Image (spheres, helix red, strand yellow):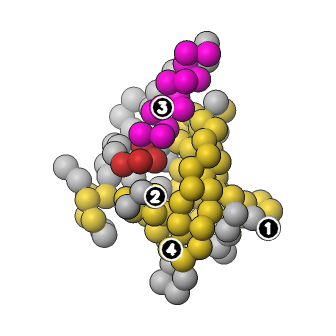
């Protein structure tokens, strides 16, 4: 588990599909937090908004940085609160806690909104 930008990230290995207006490509999420992820195997230009599809669930994201030819950091417009990526984060965080690492927590007052569909917030 590593702390970056005020959020705790956990190591994961989750196959996903990156979908843009023109293309879909396979990739792998290699670390994850409720606010973003590091994706390996496919990159898009910095600033690109796209869909991250996992097990039939869509999470929207924006490319914040491209480090290497096949690695990028992405931010979610709303914190993860449901879906397979959220479950994977919770499970990885729980495993890390059982190994003696402190549990992750969101800062007090952090927004916890999720997409209910394209451009909609869940309430």
* 38 within the magenta span: no
- The quadrant of the image that shows the N terminus is top right
- The picture places residue 100, in percent across and down from the top left corner, at 61, 13
Are the residues flagged by discs 1 and 2 in contact, CB closer than 8 Å? Answer: no
Q: Which residue is mark 3?
A: 91
- Residue, far left: 123
For residue 84, above or below residue 105: below
Q: Main secondary structure of the magenta part?
A: helix
- The picture places residue 39, in percent across and down from the top left corner, at 64, 57
For residue 24, above or below residue 108: below
* Residue 54, numbered label: 2
Earlier along the polypeptide chain: callout 1 or callout 3?
1
- Residue, far top: 100
Q: Which residue is mark 4?
A: 19
Look at the numbered disc 3 and give the secondary structure of its residue.
helix
Q: Whole-Å distance between the Cαs marked 1 and 3?
A: 29 Å
Q: Whole-Å distance between the Cαs marked 1 and 2?
A: 22 Å
- Left or right: residue 85 versus residue 5 is left
For residue 29, above or below residue 45: above
Q: Which residue is mark 1?
A: 69
Q: Whole-Å distance between the Cαs marked 2 and 4?
A: 11 Å
Earlier along the polypeptide chain: callout 1 or callout 2?
2
Counting other residues with Cα less than 10 Å from the Cα at mark 2, is it few (<14), some (14-19), or many (20 or more)? some
């Amino acid at each position: 588990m590593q702390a970056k930008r005020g959020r705790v990230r956990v190591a994961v290995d989750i196959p996903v599909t990156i979908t843009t207006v023109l293309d879909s490509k396979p990739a792998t999420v290699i670390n994850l937090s409720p606010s973003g992820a590091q994706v390996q195997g496919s990159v898009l230009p910095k600033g690109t908004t796209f869909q991250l599809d996992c097990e039939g669930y869509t999470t929207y994201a924006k490319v914040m940085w491209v480090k290497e030819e096949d690695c990028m950091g992405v931010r979610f417009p709303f914190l993860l609160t449901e879906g397979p990526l959220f479950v994977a984060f919770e499970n990885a965080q729980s495993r890390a806690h059982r190994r003696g690492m402190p549990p992750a927590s969101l800062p007090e007052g952090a927004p916890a909104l999720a997409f209910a569909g394209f451009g909609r917030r869940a309430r």
